[in-house]
């Protein structure tokens, strides 16, 4: 339960990006790639400190 709100926040952001990309074709490919990059960076920052 410690990371429940972070998981929900990431899922909400991803759902928003998917809906934005589906309903607004002018968004392009930059936003999804940017979101993937930020998710990976946050993953490494969050779990990299425990080692």
Image: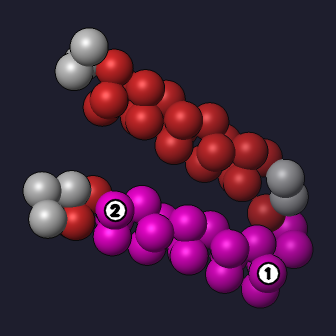
Q: Position of residue 40 (x, y in %)?
A: 54, 35
Q: Is residue 11 above or below residue 30?
A: below
- In this figure, which residue is indicated by the disc labeled 2? 7
| Front: mark 1 or 2 | 2
Q: Which residue extends farthest left?
A: 2
Q: Position of residue 41 (x, y in %)?
A: 49, 29
Circle 1 SS class: helix
Left or right: where does residue 23 sit relative to residue 19?
Answer: right
Q: Is residue 21 magenta?
A: yes
User: Mostly what secondary structure, the magenta segment?
Assistant: helix
- In this figure, which residue is indicated by the disc labeled 1? 22
Q: Is residue 29 above or below residue 46?
A: below
Left or right: where does residue 7 sit relative to residue 44?
Answer: left
Left or right: where does residue 8 sit relative to residue 30?
Answer: left
Quarter of the rendering containing residue 1: bottom left
Image quarter where the C terminus lies is: top left
Residue pictured at 22% horizontal, 21% vertical: 50
Residue pictured at 46% horizontal, 69% vertical: 11
Q: Which residue extends farthest bottom?
A: 23
Residue pictured at 66% horizontal, 81% vertical: 19
CA distance for labels 1 and 2: 22 Å
Is label 1 in contact with label 2 (beta carbons under 8 Å)? no
The residue range painted magenta reads 7-26
Q: Nearer the viewer, residue 23 or 8?
A: 8
Residue pictured at 32% horizontal, 29% vertical: 47
Checking the image for residue 4, the label placed there is: none
Q: Nearer the viewer, residue 49 or 15?
A: 49
Q: Which residue extends farthest top?
A: 51
Quarter of the rendering containing residue 4: bottom left
Disc 1 crowd rating (10 Å Cα; few below 14, some 14-19, many 20+) is few
Q: Position of residue 46 (x, y in %)?
A: 30, 31
């Amino acid at each position: 339960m410690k990371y429940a709100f972070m998981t929900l926040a990431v899922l909400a952001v991803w759902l928003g990006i998917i809906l934005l990309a589906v309903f607004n074709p002018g968004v392009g490919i930059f936003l999804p790639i940017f979101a993937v990059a930020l998710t990976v960076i946050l993953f490494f920052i969050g779990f990299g400190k425990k080692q």
